[in-house]
Amino acid sequence: MTENRPLRSKPLATRRELFGTAAIAALTGFTGSAAAQTAQRRPRIACCVTFWGGPGSHADWIICKLMDGYWWQGAHTPSRVDVVSVYIHQLDTSLLGQKVCQAKNIPIFKTVGEAVTLGGKELAVDGVVIVGEHGNYPTDLKGHWLLPRWWMYQQVIRVFEQSKRSVPVFNDKHLSYNWDDAKWMFDKSRELNFPLSGGSSIPVYFRKPEIEIAADTPIKNSIVVGAAPDEGGIFHCIDVLQCFVERRKGGETGVNSVQSIRGGAETWKWVERNPWAGRLLDSVAAKFNFKQGTFQEDARANVCIVEYNDGTKGAVISGRNVGWTYAGEIEGQNEPTIISMLGWPGPFAQYHASNAQPHWITEMMVTKQEPFHAGRLLLSTGITNHYMESNWENGSFSAVGRRIETPMMNIRYRSTRGAQFSTGARPPDTAYLRGFEK
């Protein structure tokens, strides 16, 4: 184990180097989970992050909750895990992370591999949390933020394969900006038999009304209205869409196609051509007491169009002042079902965006069960990726993107869990105690 002091990160491995390693070749004797823990020992967690700067960074929101506990169902809940190691890719600018780790006496390791082996040669932790969000990383022409989530994940996989056992892994936001990498990440979790979770924090936000759609509900068509200016924003909306649509009758059948339309002029033309989307949009406007046509006044609106294999239709439509709002047509019901996730789930002083999510991270680490089927995470990732690709072809941009057929997203699963969102009082507006003054 290294000393708890700033350490420089090693450069990224190349794909050629990765796939040339012998560690990925042999899986004989691999066991899918760690040895059974005694009731007395809390799961030990390694956290691998891109950047841990100000209190607005996801690493700070999530890891501090894993260390200090979180607000769940109207009360503070003590942590049930121990963060025992940290890796920070952009360490030099992550001064807050350095300070927190020093105050908590948690070592910062030079590499991902060292963080999950605690400086040894074998897997030495009971769970891994990857927070590849925020930091100084480039964005490509199509708008993909080139965060190294896959790069960190594959190094964890190396250790799993070398150690011939695995532990649960949480990956914040979508798996990767690249579909092939994301599919590889999902496939590895099935191959090596470890629980995988991640995604947006919005599906477990406080809801209005406080309801969940029952599994096997005959959902026909759905929209989500919310802010979607970039890849990160559209993923939040898509993950909300998927968390509801997967509960339809027969379960999830996979995605048939994805299309992106950018700009208000073309977006509202599409809505006019698709009355089901217009009706649902009007129902959201009415729910918020907006005048009809309010959303159509946005000249910068976009729409993500999703067709599922069973004929179900979905769309994410840009809209302000409604948080993240789901509206669904359900067979046999005269009025749409509308569920909103509004504002922040708590004051900024209490890391507003991260309470329910750390609860489910902790639950997975303790029970070794996925809080929801990881197929949702993969589909939300794939829809996001193909949405970003849709407007581009041969290096040229078109506001009306091409419809991309997605046979590779023929993913089936059933949503079996009940409600997982926050309820009760929101956390108080008091200063978050970190273990040091400033």
Image (tube, rainbow, N blue to C red):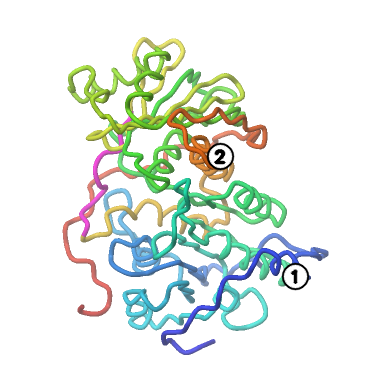
For marks 2 and 1 on the same chain, the one whose residue lies earlier in the sequence = 1
How far from the left and from the top, in percent, is residue 55? 28, 65
Q: Which mark is residue 136?
A: none
How far from the left and from the top, in percent, is residue 248? 52, 25
Residue carrying label 2: 379
Label 2 is placed on what type of residue? Leu
Residue 9 placement, left or right of 323: right
Residue 170 placement, left or right of 356: right
Q: Is residue 103 above or below residue 323?
A: below
Residue 425 placement, left or right of 16: left
* Residue occupying image coordinates x 46% and y 28%: 400
Q: Quadrant of residue 66?
A: bottom left
State which quarter of the image contains the C terminus: bottom left
Q: Is residue 50 above or below residue 99?
A: above
Residue segment shown in magenta: 339-348
Label 1 is placed on what type of residue? Thr
In this orientation, which residue lies closer to the viewer: 395 or 73? 395
State which quarter of the image contains the N terminus: bottom right
Q: Which mark is nearer the camera, 2 or 1?
A: 1
Residue carrying label 1: 21
In this orientation, which residue lies closer to the viewer: 84 or 159? 159
